[in-house]
């Protein structure tokens, strides 16, 4: 059975991958409190005694706005941490899967496919792209966008955050003139089932089947769960962006290569959650 070591094993995506695929693969968690990926010596000391076939690197600095204030920390985790893990894998001839983001694109000329040219805007996006550049052509790169899932007690994704606020009768200001591509995490896990055993050092977009504005996403959530849509107030990207990191405007992300697992639309994902 394939042995997959993974960083971020208790996170939003990693924990669900383990839940859904634990009967098919042996997962070896690499939690942050046991392994500081930014320390090269500790990485080598920790990993040299582990028996694994590949690393799935999910851990990252993902605070998009905070990264503008902490560029050194963002780069240390997303770039140097990735380099340390990847260099070890190369030295031991282990496979490496790097997870990235649609934020590597500027959102000006969609749609974006695996072979589209990145142009990251903010610190977070630039550090994730630097990580891609380190591993490109020698590891698998998987990009996904706005992941969401049915339940996870430790952290709310954007769907459950909006649902919670609407249930609390909290007014929401949601951007109406941008597009995002939400991705159901169960689909990510099932796509990885195929990619683990069909590893190639290429880029794959494992991405939801539909793109939608954040405003319309909130409206769909309110309708699906019978919540008050009058609480949702449309705003522009310009209004939202004051004091925040730049984000891709039209993040319409698609895949030419995912012919092995059909991804769900946002509406289909919401129905499953319900």
Image (spheres, rainbow, N blue to C red):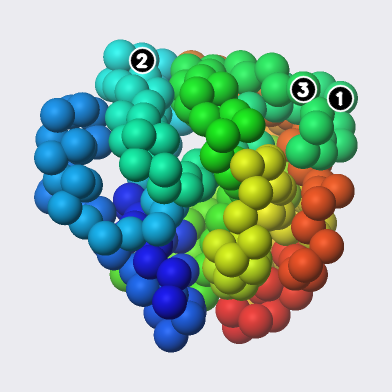
Q: Quadrant of residue 210?
A: bottom right
Name the image quarter holding the C terminus. bottom right
* Residue that carries the numbered disc 2 in the rendered image: 71
Q: Taking 265 as reference, is 87 left or right? A: left
Mark 2 or mark 3: whose residue is earlier in sequence: 2
Tell me: residue 28, above or below residue 241: below
Q: Is there any visible trace of residue 11 in the rendered image? A: no
Tell me: residue 18, above or below residue 58: below
Task: Say if mark 2 contacts mark 3, CB within 8 Å.
Answer: no
Tell me: residue 243, above or below residue 263: above
Which mark is drawn over residue 38? none
Circle 3: element type: loop
Circle 2: element type: helix
Q: Nearer the viewer, mark 3 or mark 1?
A: 3
Q: Taking 40 as reference, is 262 left or right? A: right
Q: Position of residue 149 (x, y in %)?
A: 52, 68
Cα gap from disc 3 to disc 1, whole angstroms: 10 Å
Task: Say if mark 2 contacts mark 1, CB within 8 Å.
Answer: no
Circle 1: element type: loop
Observer-nearest residue: 177 or 98? 98
Q: Residue drawn at (73%, 58%), measured in percent from left and top?
A: 208
Mark 3 or mark 1: whose residue is earlier in sequence: 1
Mark 2 or mark 1: whose residue is earlier in sequence: 2
* Residue that carries the numbered disc 3 in the rendered image: 117
Cα gap from disc 2 to disc 3, whole angstroms: 23 Å
Observer-nearest residue: 225 or 271? 271
Cα gap from disc 2 to disc 1, whole angstroms: 27 Å
* Residue that carries the numbered disc 1 in the rendered image: 109
Q: Residue drawn at (77%, 38%), measured in percent from left and top?
A: 114
Q: Position of residue 227 (x, y in %)?
A: 61, 73
Q: Position of residue 159 (x, y in %)?
A: 56, 61
């Amino acid at each position: 059975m394939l042995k997959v070591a993974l960083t971020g094993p208790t996170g939003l995506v990693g924990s669900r991958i383990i839940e859904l695929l634990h009967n098919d693969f042996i997962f070896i968690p690499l939690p942050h409190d046991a392994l500081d990926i930014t320390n090269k010596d500790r990485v080598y000391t920790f990993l040299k005694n582990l028996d694994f076939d590949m690393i799935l690197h999910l851990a990252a600095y993902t605070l998009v706005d905070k990264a503008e204030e902490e560029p050194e920390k963002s780069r240390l985790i997303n770039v140097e941490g990735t380099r340390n893990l990847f260099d070890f894998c190369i030295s031991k001839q282990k496979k490496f899967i790097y997870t990235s983001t649609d934020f590597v694109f500027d959102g000006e000329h969609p749609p974006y496919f695996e072979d589209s040219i990145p142009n990251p805007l903010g610190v977070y996006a630039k550090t994730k792209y630097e990580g891609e550049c380190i591993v490109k052509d020698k590891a698998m790169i998987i990009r996904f966008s706005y992941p969401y899932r049915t339940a996870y007690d430790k952290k709310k994704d954007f769907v459950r955050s909006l649902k919670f606020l609407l249930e609390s009768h909290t007014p929401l200001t949601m951007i109406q003139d941008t597009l995002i591509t939400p991705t159901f995490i169960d689909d990510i896990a099932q796509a990885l089932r195929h990619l683990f055993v069909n590893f190639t050092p290429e880029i794959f977009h494992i991405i939801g089947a539909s793109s939608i504005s954040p405003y319309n996403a909130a409206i769909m959530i309110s309708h699906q769960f019978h919540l008050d849509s009058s609480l949702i107030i449309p705003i522009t990207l310009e209004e939202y962006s004051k004091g925040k990191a730049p984000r891709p405007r039209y993040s319409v992300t698609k895949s030419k290569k995912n012919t092995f697992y059909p991804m769900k639309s946002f509406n289909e994902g919401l129905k499953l959650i319900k």
